[in-house]
Amino acid sequence: QKFIYNFQEGKTEMKALLGGKGANLAEMNKIGLPVPPGFTITTEACIRYLEMGEKLDENLQKSIFEYLEELEKENNKKFGDLKDPLLLSVRSGAVTSMPGMMDTILNLGLNDKSVKGLAKKASNPRFAYDSYRRLIQMFANVVLDIPGYEFDNLLEKKKEKNDYNNDTELNVDDLKEIIEEYKSLIKEREQIEFPQKPGEQLLMAVKAVFSSWNNPRARSYRNINDIPHDLGTAVTVQTMVFGNIGENSGTGVAFTRNPATGENKVFGEFLLNAQGEDVVAGIRTPKDINELEKFLPEVYTELMEITRILEKHYEDMQDIEFTIQEGNLYLLQTRTGKRTADAAVKIAVDMKDEGLIDKKTAILRVDPEDINQLLHPNFKEDELKKADLLAIGLAASPGAATGKIYFRSEDAVQAVTDGEDVILVRKETSPEDIEGMAKTNGVLTSRGGMTSHAAVVARGMGKCCVAGVGDIKVDEAAKKFYIDDRVFKEGDYISLNGSLGEVYAGIVETTDAHLSDNFKKLMQWSDQYRKLKIYTNADNQKDAVIALNFGAEGIGLCRTEHMFFDSSRINSVREMIVANTSKKRKKALDKLFPYQKDDFKELFKVMEAKDLTIRLLDPPLHEFLPQEESEIKSLADELSISIQELKTITEELAEVNPMLGHRGCRLGISYPEIYKMQVKAIISAALEVKAEKGYDVKADIMIPLIGTEKELAILREQTLELAEELIAKSDAELNYSIGTMIEIPRAALLADEIAKHADFFSFGTNDLTQMTYGFSRDDSGRFINHYLEQEIFKKDPFTVLDQSGVGKLLKMGVELGRKTKEDLKIGICGEHGGEPASIDFCHKIALDYVSCSPYRVPIARLAAAQSAI
Ligand code: ADP
Ligand code: MG
Ligand code: MG
């Protein structure tokens, strides 16, 4: 089996085997871009290594040295040579890029002797010793697991002692001393010498990279990002090029377009006389890529040209790493650039308009879940004017966030779990902070640039982030930060504007999002492809208007009971519930009727001729009864009964299993007058709005919790009779229909019978999920995390539809329903109606519509289009 490929043998399509980095280095080499030669050891070799108990087998070792020999020929240099040594980088590369997770070693092959040769050969001793001290530090960190900061501390001490500001001021003697100190540190910690044999360095480095696949940081990153644990990482071994030779050398990172705004302009940073991760580590403040033109104009022009070639080749925005060695440009990495949702939309639309990609590709480029960020609030303008601006840093990742500050990731996560709004404040973040960053509202750092760990990770997560706020002094140990003479401690509120880099004291209020023209364009394109209609779940005019603005085509679920809780009418509702005769109940219902009719009229007015699906009363009645002593007294007074009497009645209404009790259509069967009042309110409201406004209103009456054909037959008959009577009286015509929810498994199983009495079906997947699994949504919180941890569930079935189980019932419901009525309209109105994977399933089983909460309407439009493409 072949476990190694050199750059001539690989290509992008071999990502699974060569990792993203290795595959793309090979691809760049193939299209003629300047890439230092190298080879990649496959992910399969990694998996084998891990299976064999972290051992490199003989054959693989042999093969590594064979490829090394080829590399020596290509470079015309020998690895381990004392006069002119070939130096290597050993780089990890997973299939999906995992920023900062796995580690890299540079300058491999140097030792006490060859460093002298390199110094002489390059006639630049400083460069040689700087490279050697970097090798020792990285090797110790990656291979021997000695924390990097211990080495940083030694370096900092040396700088302090000599009163240097920059690493570049360290001279050869300083570096020699540092090297000795580094070596002593290794000896003290690990009781071993820094290995002097280059071959040994290489094998140890390869093993360490393979092993790092299973380090806790990498595992936690994969857990958060849903990356499987069994893919393994590839290792790329590459010829070193040096950015630390002098002022005509350097290193940098660039995006081919702006990853925060999407602007079509190369965006990046570089440092002269620097190596490796100096730029992202925030050691020195990097320069804007545009300034490279001043320092090295030819390199700048070449770099700009290369970004265009790369975009054309990959047909997407790229994130590249490059190094300049004495005026020569080399590319060290390219990958698809992470971007904010704003940028994703703009780049997709721009690239389509530039003719780089087609419309379908543009639609597929934006992750529906990411759109969420665009639909969310910003700070209110007038609130901002009054706000107490503390400092301005880098606008690292857009959005607005308010919360209490926490300085340690663990504390922040705990506070979020306790229900707090939290902002994580760090000097700079590291991979250990990932969970804290994922869960909090925003991130603030006092160090680091636009490509620092905090900035890159926050943008990827769509998390508001302000980075590199130099004016703020963070004391993580004391859990405080200082600015001028003010102190902010754990638990104090601040607000962040990630779009402008502003930091405010206290809470700043937010407003609704403004949707860009690009966004609207993408939505229009989506509408041209999708087959599913997008409805919304809205119980009142306000929500309906939000949803309509987001492009909702109808209301798929209006829950009438939410209207009952209004303080002006709750007592009439309660009166109806405690009524022990049909006559008393009717009296209470008569009081409720005008309220209900007005509610519906408001909705019909905003929906005009669009579908308005109204569900008749569903929850168990006792949910409406008063709990507080004062409320009980007030109701008793109103009903002119004693408190004791009222309490007896409410006790009688209590149920052991209310969610499986007297609710839904069962209420309609036992108290027909309740549903009659609601039907009368719906039909009258529709007729009145039609008469007043001339809209061709559409009323869809939905009967919940049907389990048998007979239930629906009875309730349909009763509804039909009343509706026809009202319509006849009004002398007008009305477009209305009577349908049912499919939310009890039996209804799905017998959907052919149910369909005889239904004009439409709507899958209520919240109830259907809890009834299919046999556990309640309200109680599943107690065990669901254990189920997720033990991978009994991959996803919470209340969030992502269980396609194999609950989905089977949906499929059956559709097939049986349409067997009876070929063109039966069918939709979904559970939470799943706004979740992309579930929407995809709904598309596949040929539903007519999905209905979701107003803010998810655009997500659903895009997801439905992607399913149809
Ligand atoms: P990561 O996956 O963490 O980005 P990389 O393998 O890309 O790790 O290495 C980090 C940095 O090390 C690169 O951005 C580059 O600056 C430097 N580097 C890696 N390989 C080489 C090389 N062959 N020559 C010079 N610098 C290198
Ligand atoms: Mg790294
Ligand atoms: Mg890299």
Image (cartoon, grey):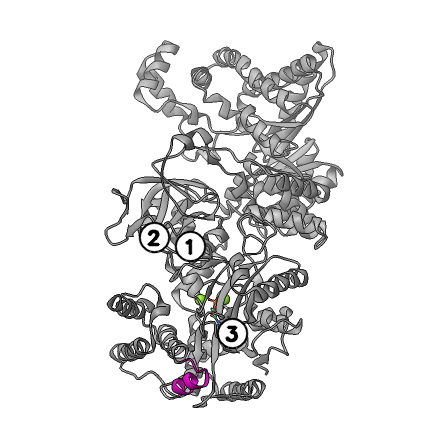
**Dot 1 amino acid type:** Ala
Tell me if 437 is positioned left or right of 36 in this view: left
- Could you say which is closer to the camera, residue 857 or residue 343? 343
Q: Tag 1, which secondary structure?
A: helix
- Could you say which is closer to the camera, residue 580 or residue 725? 725
Q: Residue at x 63, y 15 (%)?
A: 684
Quadrant assignment, res 145: bottom left
**Dot 3 amino acid type:** Glu
Q: Which mark is residue 454?
A: 1
Q: Are marks 3 and 2 in contact (CB under 8 Å)?
A: no
Badge nearest the viewer, 1 or 3: 3
Pointer 1 or 3: first along the chain:
3
Classed neighbour count for the residue bearing mark 2: other residues with Cα under 10 Å, few (<14), some (14–19), many (≥20) = many
119 magenta-colored? yes
Q: Residue at x 74, y 17 (%)?
A: 733
Residue 563 position in % (x across, y down): 50, 22
Q: CA distance from mark 2 to mark 1?
A: 9 Å
Q: Can residue 544 be seen?
A: yes
10 magenta-colored? no
Give the mark count.
3
- Could you say which is closer to the camera, residue 485 or residue 444? 485
Q: Are marks 2 and 1 in contact (CB under 8 Å)?
A: yes
Look at mark 3 in the image and give the residue it sits on. Answer: 326
Tell me if 692 is positioned left or right of 398 in this view: right
**Dot 2 amino acid type:** Arg
Q: Tag 3, which secondary structure?
A: loop
Pointer 2 or 1: first along the chain:
2
Ligand 2 under 8 Å from disc 2 Cβ: no
Look at mark 2 in the image and give the residue it sits on. Answer: 426
Which residues are the magenta region? 114-124
Pointer 3 or 2: first along the chain:
3
